[in-house]
Image: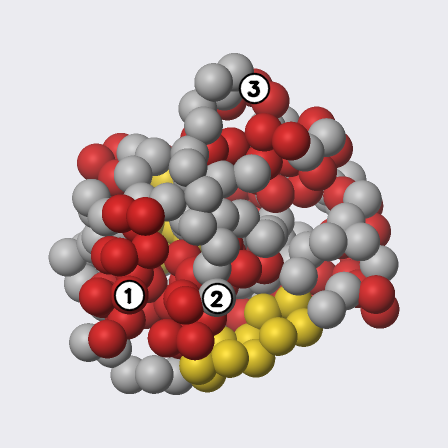
Amino acid sequence: MTRTPLRWATTLLATATLAVLGLANPAQAATVSQPLRTMVANLPVASEIRTGYNRDLFPHWVDADGDGCNTRYEVLIAEATTNPSVGSGCTLSGGRWFSYYDGAYWTNPSDLDIDHMVALAEAWDSGARSWTTSRRQSYANDMGDVRALVAVTDNVNQSKGDQDPASWVPTREVCRYIGEWVAVKTRWRLTVDTAEKNALTSRAASCSNITLTVTHAF
């Protein structure tokens, strides 16, 4: 079974994945390109509401294209720095991965978690509580933007939990992380709370003001 290992190569599957997951027609989706600090400034501020949250309300790690590999494994395959062999039941062997949060390399897939850049609970707090289950499934398995899901060292992901950048950022590549966080929040039209907005503004001021291009998911 031959798979493309490069992270950016997931965009080749974006159109098919969007259709399977029931996202908006890409032809109708709005694309925005803005400098990082502008995109931060444009994030709407609202209070977070955790009431009613349950992780099961975001069906995740689905096999959207029916190839025997669920979203977790699709991300592992896409992000591998050394292409793994894909066996029965989507078992992976011989691959190598880099976790940019902590600069660690791994060869055992079980040492990696797939991090939702904006955690499911944070998404709920920021607007996903009003979505349909189908839309929450689309969010939880978003292969349409390479910034949405990232393979990282498992215990680092666990230390992050559902925290936003007001209380947690990785030890490495903080500016990349901030840009990806802002892109995902923008893509899914999610809000930020005041502490989060302040933290993003402060962090972005110390980063290169690169232009981010984001296609809205709906």
- Nearest to viewer (mark 3 / mark 2): 2
Closest to the observer: 117 or 121? 121
Q: Position of residue 64 (x, y in %)?
A: 73, 41
Label 1 sits on residue: 201
- Lateral position of residue 65 relative to residue 80, left or right: right
Lower position in the chain sequence, tag 3 or tag 1: 3
Residue shown at the point (22%, 66%) measured from the top left: 203
Q: Position of residue 94 (x, y in %)?
A: 41, 52
Res 130 visible: yes
Q: Check the image and name the residue furthest to the left.
A: 171
Label 2 sits on residue: 42
Q: Position of residue 190 (x, y in %)?
A: 53, 48
Q: Tell whether label 2 touches label 3 (CB within 8 Å).
A: no
Is 2 rendered above or below residue 207? above
- Lateral position of residue 68 relative to residue 165, left or right: right
Q: Secondary structure at mark 2?
A: loop
> What distance separates the C-alpha of mark 3 from that of mark 2?
31 Å
Amino acid at circle 2: Asn
Amino acid at circle 3: Asp
Res 137 visible: no
Q: Quadrant of residue 95?
A: bottom left
Closest to the observer: 11 or 31? 31
Q: Secondary structure at mark 3?
A: helix
Q: Position of residue 36 (x, y in %)?
A: 40, 75
Lower position in the chain sequence, tag 2 or tag 1: 2
Label 3 sits on residue: 56
> What distance separates the C-alpha of mark 2 from that of mark 1?
11 Å
Q: Quadrant of residue 62?
A: top right
- Lateral position of residue 137 relative to residue 98, left or right: right
Residue shown at the point (76%, 64%) measured from the top left: 29
- Dot 1, crowdedness within 10 Å: few (<14), some or many (≥20)? some
